[in-house]
Image: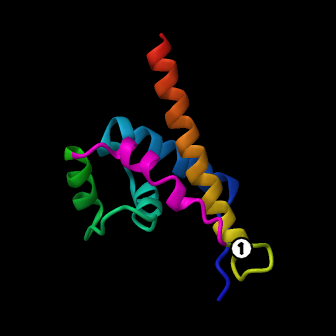
Amino acid sequence: MDIAPLTDRQKSLIVNNVVKACYDINALNRTGYKYLYLANGFIAHYNLGGFRDHYARHNLMVAILDHEEDNTWRNFSPDCHNYEYYKSKREVYKAICSKLRNKTLNTWNS
């Protein structure tokens, strides 16, 4: 079964929501949650509420940045099944990390 790659709109919605949730976990919506709970390094939760509760007590930004290496899906090549899907997931994770690093640097430098 082929999995469709994320569209540019989906990518943008996920990136923006997850970055926002790093500063206010209650901003995390189902789209961001669905992306994150399938990523490596995030403990399983029964639902969005459980995920929010966990990251209200733990730093989501740190968890995301700490697991960047695990979530780049580098073990796929263009001839692999669903390569474009995993490539789109990698692009999203890298964009999230980039925004988090840039925002942190901009805050630190201001």
| Picture colour scheme | rainbow
Q: Residue furthest top?
A: 110
At 69% from the left and 53% from the top, the residue drawn is: 8
Q: State whether residue 61 is above or below residue 38.
A: above
Q: Determine whether, in the image, residue 42 is placed left or right of residue 45.
A: right
Asked if the stretch drawn in magenta spans residue 60, the answer is: yes
Q: State whether residue 1 is above or below residue 102.
A: below
Asked if the stretch drawn in magenta spans residue 70, the answer is: yes
Q: Determine whether, in the image, residue 87 is placed left or right of residue 44.
A: right
Q: Determine whether, in the image, residue 45 is placed left or right of residue 5.
A: left
User: Quadrant location of residue 91?
Assistant: bottom right
Q: State whether residue 96 is above or below residue 44.
A: above
* Badge 1 element: helix
Q: Quadrant of the N terminus?
A: bottom right
Q: State whether residue 69 is above or below residue 22.
A: below
Give the mark count.
1
Give the percent coordinates (x, y) of residue 28. 37, 49
Q: Amino acid at mark 1?
A: Tyr
Give the percent coordinates (x, y) of residue 65. 46, 45
At 32% from the left and 37% from the top, the residue drawn is: 24
In-front residue for pair 106/46: 106
Label 1 sits on residue? 83
Q: Residues within 10 Å of mark 1 (few under 14, many from 20)?
A: some
At 65% from the left and 52% from the top, the residue drawn is: 9
In-front residue for pair 69/109: 69
- Which stretch appears magenta? 58-75
Give the percent coordinates (x, y) of residue 109. 49, 13
At 79% from the left and 73% from the top, the residue drawn is: 78
In-front residue for pair 60/17: 60
Q: Residue furthest right?
A: 79
